[in-house]
Each structure stands twice: as C-alpha cells, then as structure tokens.
Image: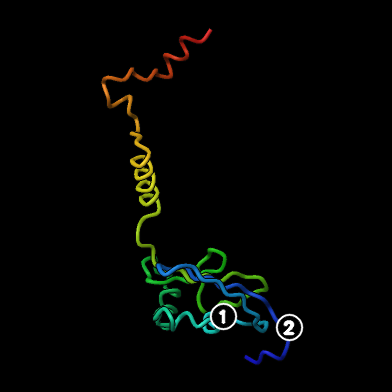
Amino acid sequence: MDEGAGPMITVEVCRVSAQGIGHARLTLPSGATVRDALRRTGWLEAQGIDEKRLESDAAARKVDAPWAVAIVGHRVGLDELLCDHDRVELLAPVIIDPMLARQRRAEHRRKLAGERRWARDRDPRLPARPRRSDQDADAP
C-alpha cells in the first residue's frame, strides 16, 4: 500500500505469548487490513507463525488454533479492514484453563499464609461455625 496517499489511521497491535506482552503503535493508510498491521510489526516471522495456517484457522474459527487474531477481543480474519484506533491482538494459545490457574494461585497463597480453607469444618478442636439459621434465631 502506498503510505503517502490518502488519510492515515492509527492502530495498536498487541502480542500476548509465553515470551511476554508486546505493543506497537502503527500509522497505516486508510483501508489497511489486519494482515498489513501484522506484517508491519514483523511478529509473525519472529514468533515462527505460518501466515497461511493463521488465516485458515481464523476463517474456520477454530477454538483450538495455536494462534488467534482479534480486534478488541473479537476474533477476526486477516482480511478484516481496520478503523482508526483499533487494537489488533495476536493471541497465543491458552495453556491452562484460567479458572484452574486462579484456583491454584489462591491455594498457593493460602499455603504461604498458613491458612486452611474451612478450617473450622475440618478441625474438631475448633468450635463449630454457626449456621445461618442459628444466627437468625439469636437475632432479637
């Protein structure tokens, strides 16, 4: 595309992978596509991503694709036209279920703090936790 002709748009391209997060702010000619933005960053070659496979996975809307492309969280194809101030996201595959990762982090924090979840229910030496119905009965 000829960069000297016509109006220009500004887009942000983000990469999220195991190597970290990358950001690039680009100025592209109006009518540029997601493919143009990704080529300009050079991340496809740097990450070893096959552009043809990325395009076929995006067209098939594969959930288990190794990489995905999105504009502000919505998966798109490489030929999607960009608008001014769009954020293009190049997303690595999800390695672990986010809910499971959160549970593991919480458990790790509890172990570090010496806490046990529901300790009163597990340890007979501790007084039993009052039930909601017991609390309501004590209220005046």
Dots 1, 2 in contact, CB < 8 A: no
23 relative to 66 in the view: left or right: right
Residue 37's tag is 1
At label 2, the amino acid type is Pro
At label 1, the amino acid type is Ala
Label tally: 2
SS under mark 2? loop
Disc 2: CA contacts within 10 A as few (<14), some (14-19) or many (>=20) = few
x and y, in percent, of residue 138 in the image: 47, 9
* Depth order, front residue of 50/63: 50
Q: CA distance from mark 1 to mark 2?
A: 16 Å
- Residue beneath the point at 43% across and 81% down: 46
**Residue 13 quadrant:** bottom right
x and y, in percent, of residue 114 in the image: 34, 36
Q: Is residue 55 above or below residue 93?
A: below
Colour scheme employed for the rendering of this structure: rainbow
* Depth order, front residue of 122/81: 122
- Residue beneath the point at 72% across and 90% down: 5
106 relative to 88 in the view: left or right: left
Q: Is residue 133 above or below residue 25?
A: above
For marks 1 and 2, the one nearer the N-term is 2
**Residue 133 quadrant:** top left
- Residue beneath the point at 48% across and 79% down: 43
37 relative to 54 in the view: left or right: right
SS under mark 1? helix
x and y, in percent, of residue 32 in the image: 61, 82
Residue 63's tag is none
Q: Residue furthest left?
A: 124
Disc 2 target residue: 7
**Residue 1 quadrant:** bottom right
- Residue beneath the point at 35% across and 43% down: 107
x and y, in percent, of residue 116 in the image: 33, 34
